[in-house]
Image (cartoon, grey):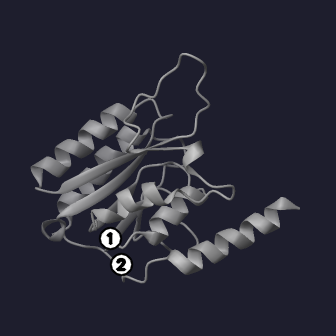
Amino acid sequence: MLEPVKDMFRRHSLKKNASTEPTGFVPLEKIHSAVAFIDVEDTSFNECKNQLMLFFREHGIKGDIFFFDFRKLTEGERLITSITTTILKKDLNWFGKPSSEKMNLMLDGEPDLFISLLPYADFPLEFMAKCSRAHFKIGREQLPGDTFDLVIKDPGDRKLSEAEVCKELIKFMDKIR
């Protein structure tokens, strides 16, 4: 019973907040700012974060990295990423929409490039991707409405880590001139 109501609120929220900016492939030299999303549950997230930071620095891109961390922390367990740039379960409303605070942090940088290295495309990511005014959007799983301009899929025989996907993405980005 709750799922149809959730879906209705999600559709309404997306319709109201989605960006109308046209998107498509953008050459690397025209990218000045970027936002990337990484899942901390992937054991290679730190390596991935370092690869992205190096890539941004080498290309003069002002890059912000956000982390999705929906784990239930046990008593005594601490966050391993900055609370400011980490989207937690408590940062989502009852139907999965990220808080205004987290959305504003992502949107304030007016990124040219949106990168999701998350191996899934659930509603919080869908909302952030569709609301972003980035001109070039990259993800690992296509969202309804063809939100991502480039989708990097796992090969059929195995699941890639975020660091492996990041490495391939960087190789590809270096070729877009």
Q: Which residue is mark 1?
A: 136
> Would residue 26 be found to the left or right of residue 86 on screen?
left
On residue 23, which mark appears?
2
> Would residue 22 be found to the left or right of residue 131 on screen?
left
Q: Indicate the position of residue 16 as horizontal and vertical percent values.
A: 56, 79
Q: Single out the residue that lies furthest toward the front.
A: 101
Q: Amino acid at mark 2?
A: Thr
Q: Indicate the position of residue 24 as horizontal and vertical percent values.
A: 33, 77
Q: Quadrant of residue 3?
A: bottom right
> Would residue 87 be found to the left or right of residue 22 on screen?
right
Q: Residue at x 41, y 28 (%)?
A: 80
On residue 2, which mark appears?
none
Which label's residue is closer to the chain start, 2 or 1? Answer: 2
Q: Residue at x 19, y 48 (%)?
A: 55
Q: Quadrant of residue 27?
A: bottom left
Q: Give the vertical position of 48 relative to 55 (above or below).
A: above
Do labels 2 and 1 touch, CB within 8 Å?
Answer: yes
Crowd band around label 2 with a 10 angstrom C-alpha radius: few (<14), some (14–19), many (20+): some
Q: Indicate the position of residue 83 as horizontal and vertical percent values.
A: 41, 38
Q: Amino acid at mark 1?
A: Phe
Q: Residue at x 73, y 73 (%)?
A: 8
- Quadrant in the picture for the C terminus: bottom left
Seen from the viewer's position, the closer of residues 111 and 99 is 99
Measured Cα–Cα span from mark 2 to mark 1: 5 Å
How many badges with numbers are in the image?
Answer: 2
Q: Quadrant of residue 151?
A: bottom left
Seen from the viewer's position, the closer of residues 15 and 57 is 15
